[in-house]
Amino acid sequence: MSSQKEQRPVAGNRGYIRQKKERTIDIVSRRLAQRYRKEKRFKLYGLFSIILSTVFLAVLLTSIVSNGYSAFFQTYIKLDVTLESTMLDRENLGKSDFQGIIKQSITKLYPEVADRKSKRELYALFSSGAAFQLRETVMKNPGLVGKTIPYWVPADDDVDMLMKGHSKRGVPENERRLDDRQLGWIDKLVDQNRIEKKFNVTFFTAGDSREPELAGIWGAVKGSFFTLLVTLALSFPIGIAAAVYLEEFAPKNLATDFIEVNINNLAAVPSIVFGLLGLAVFLNFFGMPRSTSLVGGLVLMLMTLPTIIIASRAALKAVPPSIREAALGVGSSKMQMVSNHVLPLALPGMLTGTIIGMAQALGETAPLLMIGMVAFIVDIPGGFTDPAAVMPVQIYLWADSPERAFLERTSAAIMVLLAFLIMMNAVAVIMRRRFEKRW
Amino acid sequence: MAEATLDGGKKSDAFVLTPEKLRRQRIARFFGEGFLLLVASFVAIVVLFIFYFVAVDAIPFFQQRGFVEFFSSTNWYPADEPGEFGALAIIYGSGMVTIGSALIAVPLGISAAICLSDVLPFSIRQYAKPVIEMLAAIPSVAYGFFALVIFAPLLQNYGGPILMWAWWLIAGPFVILAVIVVSDLLTSGDKGGANRETMRFIVTAVLGVLAVLFLYWVGKTLNAIQILSGTNALNVSLILSFMALPTIVSVSEDSLQAVGRELREGSYALGATRAETIVKTVLPAASSGILAAVILGIMRAIGETMVVWMASGNSSHIPDPWYNYLDSIRTLTATIAGDMGEADQVTGSARYHVLFAMGLLLLVFSFISNLVSERIVVRQRKILAGE
């Protein structure tokens, strides 16, 4: 590189010349290597940050999946349930003592357990919901009365955790949730092939519960569905109407500027403040029912409006002016032009924005805490005015629970929520690809 | 439509604008436009509405207790009778996590945006972009769960080693790069001549040894730190920074893209390398847009509730010493979310209204920063358009 001392051939001059003075090109070429090195380094800076965020995302997702996948399975224990007709009243099946029947069949498995305290410990291995499930089965099929049937009941969450290997046998007895005797009983079940992991249907069909093995997300899914329905029904028409007005009709004046600034302001409002508004206005001022999908939907409507408006405006902007001029040129009014030509062309883009807005609403938690959606709700909501939980709130509630079994259920619920969100975003992306027109 | 006229003119009156039709059109337009205006102004009114309702519930607090206690005391005992409502520590906590997350997210976000818009080839970019967008799609409660259940215990049990490795992994490359840059700079003058290469080698080696020692020493110090609680400001700042990242990346990438090709090509034509073009031409041109991106990202961090509520420890005191990120803190949003459950039982009391006062504070702050960032973006657009 350092060339000023050497002789070198120079194009254009015949023969060799000795250089006395450094020329500009020499300075440039001398620094060139250094500049190229800088260039390479520069690339690394950017790459580093992208790799870091990829790693973070990977860690986040894998830790959730690795914590959560086991919740899709649940340990069940097989009991030989004798549905004696003496214990079951055929006329009044619903009120029969199913708890007693379950306990009877448990004690039949362990004839050696006699005293009260040990019995209680024994019963603790089985889910307290077993009797309800048996009742459902018998009510559906009354012909079973009088027979002995093999019946799979869900195991208690402590047993479930042990079978899944989340709680260890090795720790000292007083730090364990199951004592040595209970472990022995479980071993006996294992020896008799009476214990098995099955697909956890309850998780997808039940509402919330204090018992992890009986808790499910169906109530929350349905609550989310109703809430999103309210949000969609309100924010889609309002958002599109506002976008059409601003893009097609609005005169350039102060009032329009004011509206535009406020749409951006609305987008910037912290989500918790929407919750405050919902509490102060919808609940305390209008007296709407607490923790319902209706109020949740109204609050989320306000949150999603800016997203939908901004996306819809972009979609309208993408429709080329030639379409508008052609429509006006053949004599349509401005209203006809917009509703017959511009709107249909912009609709896919608007729908994409709407889906992304809905995905946002689906993942939102904080404002819903404010309007009382954190309540512990076991019943599955049947309508807009029933008390309901939504999925993110359900996740929040479970994340606060101390039981290890709820930890995996929380992760599993997050996985389900993420699946919904990714699906919605994917649909939006596919729609954009499919209907996007290059003019 | 066009065929209809060719059919022999049977339906020709469909294309005649009679005065009757014109009137109908005008009426339709009047009502249609009026309706649309009404809907659009609804959105604007909603914002005023939010402001009004939050303010209406916040004012009684200031009437009852005045401003001084709220902004200057750190005693936060809302449940006592009479309660103490000093929010200084809470405001401080909000500021602390915001600054902490900005410190991480801003350099990361800007370099990722530059990389996405100017450096990476399309084949990599089409995979890198969805990764960043995915960070935005993950619901905040999932981040909160991660921070509380997975990251906090890790931080508590292996805090020192984690800090050490994070320091090595993150600061390591930068320190090494800095060594190369500094040694380049030191030896880049015209002096030196033929043995400049050896000079550079020696300088690089010396600086390199010093840098490694520095890295090792800081790492060792960090390794010795005992973290008492995993739910602290560091945890929250880190998670929030990744939540703010997509906003920063996408807004600053937009503003980098807004810098036209002419500027870039002009710079290349003058012989600049790509790095020089970006640093000396594109970045200054896009700087205001990037500033707006940073403001929006920071707002995202301030307004975030679930992560801070779940993982910040929620103890309302100013950490000791004031920069101690390993201490628990409490933020405005978390206080609103956490206290409202009980405060709502006593609607009308100072305890209820103080939460609205906090909401008002957040709202005012977000409006101001939004207006500022918008101004900046508009100005950039004007400058780039040559107005």
Image (cartoon, coloured by chain):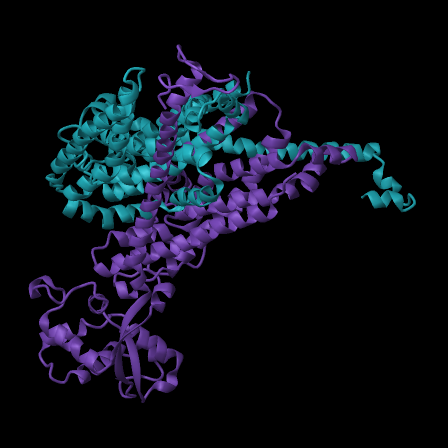
Chain colours: A purple, B cyan
A258 relative position to A365: left or right:
right
The image quarter containing residue B225 is: top left
B61 relative position to A290: left or right:
left
Front-lying residue, B136 or A202? B136
Residue A361 rendering spot, x and y as whole percentages: 43, 45
B108 relative position to A120: left or right:
right
In the depicted structure, whether residue A277 falls above or below residue B295: below
Residue at the image point whose x is 33% and y is 53% from the top: A394
Q: Quadrant of the C terminus of chain A?
A: top right
Camera sees residue B340: no
Front-lying residue, B213 or B54? B213
Residue at the image point whose x is 35% and y is 42% from the top: A51
In the depicted structure, whether residue A343 falls above or below residue A423: above
Front-lying residue, B242 or A287? B242
In the depicted structure, whether residue B93 falls above or below residue A203: above
The number of callouts visible is 0
Residue B84 rendering spot, x and y as whole percentages: 18, 30
Outermost right residue: B8
Residue A244 rendering spot, x and y as whole percentages: 60, 35
Residue B236 rendering spot, x and y as whole percentages: 25, 39
Residue at the image point whose x is 19% and y is 34% from the top: B325
Residue at the image point whose x is 24% and y is 67% from the top: A164
Q: Quadrant of the N terminus of chain A?
A: top left
Front-lying residue, B238 or A55? A55
Camera sees residue A94: yes
